[in-house]
Image (cartoon, rainbow, N blue to C red):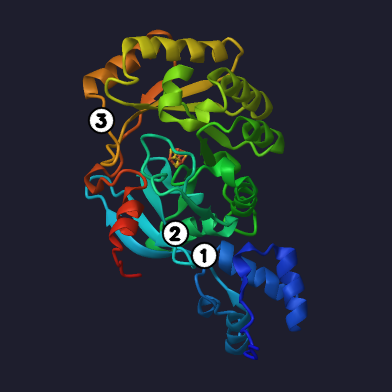
Amino acid sequence: MDNSIKAEEKKDIGIMSLDELKEEMTKLGAPAFRAGQIFSWLHAKYAGSFDEMTNLSKDFRELLNKRYEIRRPSILKELISEKDGTRKYLLRLYDGNVIESVLMKYEHGNSVCISSQAGCRMGCGFCASTLNGLERNLSFYEMAGQIYTIAAHTKEKISNVVIMGSGEPLDNYKNLKGFIELVSDKNGMNLGRRNITVSTCGIVPKIYELADEGYAITLAISLHSPTDELRRQIMPIARKYSIKELMDAAAYYYGKTGRRITFEYTLIKDFNDSDKCAMELMKLINGLKQKNVMCHVNLIPVNAVKERKFEHSKPPFIQNFKNILERYQINVTIRREMGSDINAACGQLRKSYIDEGEQGKVL
Ligand code: SF4
């Protein structure tokens, strides 16, 4: 018989709402206003330890430390682009899982791209994040914590967030909702919901659900092919939902939120970058425009992933593709390659860390 007394597992304080924190304070015999102070330290001042909470007494901080844990991700590796100041991060979660986040600097403000899962189970053919499958979902605090860690480390103000790192956010729906509510909380980060973009590979029923939540965040749909036949070759989700179903969901989302839909289209050499593909894509977008849905196409030069066979479309092909869409008055941009000198395609930093068992130094 094992008589050892198990140390009580510390509670994850980052996922507690203000009301839950108040209950905890009551249990500790502390005044309720402490809850507001702690919430503010965690979510407005991005504290990563109780020691930073200087308006709490040392004894009280020690008590908190014994009972609770702040599971803010820590930095394992930081790569800084000399070209445009983009910073890529390999972050470690409290249980040793690793994820990636990116800070991008634009004229209109700083944007952070965060991960929603450690790994991904969607299996998109051009993506490194899915090569080792899904490890686990991130909690909503771990999602927000990526922004907090980067903001605390760089002292930069973050004005936009895109959930476009590893993972499919609509496959971690409950935490996605928790994240949106947390970062837009006026007692916390107070980020405008219009400044949040969720990128999905197209889980159709969840797009309807998200539309009905009334969040009015921006939706980016990873389309990457204009026909079901092509799309099924690179995106397993396309075997479940057709492009027609996806377009109907996009129209519904726009109808409910009034937010312009972005279609992400990764250009892959000799696969989806032909004139014919551009015309097919034009027809899809025009079909939505006829329903008064505002759309935008973002062309992405594919990042080569060494485990995958896909190659970049050459710049003239990308420009030609754009010209065709523009000829039909489609709103289209070519995504600026941020941090091209620190390369590492999305998910590649994490993949090599896992494969090589590389030991990074925590900052
Ligand atoms: S592109 Fe997104 S949804 Fe597809 S495998 Fe990669 S992380 Fe998952």
187 left or right, relative to 199: right
Q: Which mark is residue 311?
A: 3
Q: Secondary structure at mark 1?
A: loop
Label 1 to label 2: alpha-carbon separation: 8 Å
Instruction: Tell me which amino acid carries mark 1.
Output: Tyr
The residue that mark 2 highlights is 151
Q: Which image quarter: residue 186? A: bottom right
What crowding class fits label 2: few (fewer than 14 Cα within 10 Å), some (14-19), or many (20 or more)? Answer: some
Note whether 333 is above or below 67 in the view shown: above
Q: State the image quarter where residue 354 is shown.
A: bottom left
Image quadrant where one finds the C terminus: bottom left
Secondary element type, mark 2 = helix
Q: Are marks 1 and 2 in contact (CB under 8 Å)?
A: yes
| Front position among marks 3 and 2 | 3
What is the x, y in percent for residue 253? 63, 27
Give the residue at mark 1: 46
Q: Is mark 3 within 8 Å of ligand 1?
A: no
For the residue carrying disc 1, how many other residues have a C-alpha within 10 Å: few (<14), some (14-19), or many (20+)?
many
User: Along the polypeptide, which appears first: circle 3 or circle 1?
Assistant: 1
